[in-house]
Image (cartoon, rainbow, N blue to C red):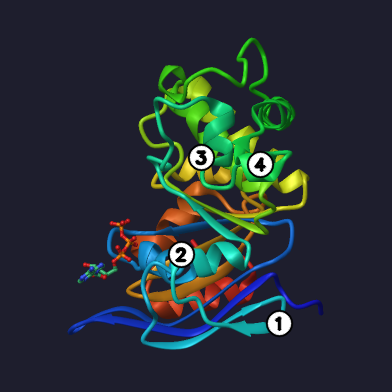
Amino acid sequence: MAEPLIRMQNIRKSYGRVQALEDANFHVNEREIVGLLGDNGAGKSTLIKVLSGAVPLTSGDIYIRGKKVTLRSTSDAIAHGIETIYQDSALVTQLSIARNLFLGREPIKPPRFLNRMDQEAMNNVARDLLKQVGISKNIPPTTPIGSLSGGERQAVAIARAMHFDSDLIILDEPTNNLGVAETQGVLSFVRSARDSGHSCIFIAHNIHHVFQVVDRIVVMRRGKVVADDIDPKTTTVTEVERIITGMSDKEIRDAVADGKPSH
Ligand SMILES: Nc1ncnc2c1ncn2[C@@H]1O[C@H](COP(=O)(O)OP(=O)(O)OP(=O)(O)O)[C@@H](O)[C@H]1O
């Protein structure tokens, strides 16, 4: 079988005496959207922070396409093609969509020694990207981020990750505080990221949003991954909720072995 894009093996993370991750095993395949679910304190954010280089792991290994990597910082993770989009995705509200897409990585116009940003190149790329994620209608790339809705801002952050060729885009609660139409927009941006060859990890407390967009669901409990191959097409929301909160570890093992949670 092909190596997954990302494999995290026996990951442990302790914060003093708190064991946030306990031998967690997790993987993401190429072109796959994985939904990461779990109750408060289950360890989702810690797992993602370890993968995005934001916190160091205590022990365990991370592989990208089968090659072991060490992620010492968020820039390390970005250099390895892992981009994390938080709710407030570090966009600068006063700057245009185009400038935000290139923040810190602006193209320079020739002659290079004059060090002038290539505004036209940025606008052209921005126009294409906005079309790809489906928000090009009547929104010019020169529009300041401050005048976009929450959903459109998420789209810009996703477009940025797509343009800079992130293999894995991690979305931490991207639909929080969004209305129904905006949520549908964000879900479709996530699908377009997958369709153009990217993988995504999608974390959301709203399990219905997860069901609408992911290819596979992974559930964490008390620092461990307790189910990692739940198919949203053949499993119900109620069954997944039971795995998140209700079932004993043995019940989950039996249910996952049967391919379906028992009733
Ligand atoms: N910086 C920290 N210092 C100490 N303990 C922490 C820290 N961050 C997380 N923890 C603890 O680690 C455990 C896992 O927390 P984590 O935030 O990863 O869970 P989560 O599944 O993301 O929860 P939520 O859905 O509430 O965000 C919890 O017991 C939490 O209190």
Indicate yes or no: mark 4 CB to ligand 1 under 8 Å: no
Q: Split into 4 quadrants, where in the image is the N terminus?
A: bottom right
State the residue at coordinates (58%, 40%): 102
Disc 3 designates what residue? 209
Between marks 2 and 4 in the image, the one whose residue lies nearer the viewer: 4
Q: Quadrant of residue 78?
A: bottom right
Front one among 44 and 132? 132
Q: Which residue is mark 1?
A: 66
Q: Residues within 10 Å of mark 3 (few under 14, many from 20)?
A: some
Q: Is residue 207 visible?
A: yes
What is the CA distance from the residue labelled 2 to the residue labelled 4? 22 Å
**Mark 1 crowd level (few <14, some 14–19, many ≥20, 10 Å Cα):** few
Q: Which residue is mark 4?
A: 107
Measuring 70% from the left and 66% from the top, which residue is drawn there? 29
Residue matched to label 2: 74
Measured as percent of width and height from the top left, residue 204 is found at 43, 47
- Ligand 1 resides in the quarter of the picture at bottom left
The kind of residue tagged 1 is: Gly
Q: State which quadrant residue 49 falls in.
A: bottom left
Give the percent coordinates (x, y) of residue 159.
63, 38
Q: Secondary structure at mark 3?
A: helix
Tell me if mark 4 has few (under 14), some (14-19) or many (20+) residues whose alpha carbon lies within 10 angstroms of its own.
Answer: some
Residue 38 higher or lower than 195, as above or below: below
Q: Residues within 10 Å of mark 2 (few under 14, many from 20)?
A: some
Could you tell me the amino acid type at mark 3?
A: His
Question: Which is in the foreground here, disc 3 or disc 1?
Answer: 1
Name the image quarter holding residue 260.
bottom right
154 left or right of 109?
left
The one of 161 and 108 positioned closer to us in this rendering? 108
Which comes sooner in the sequence, label 3 or label 2?
2
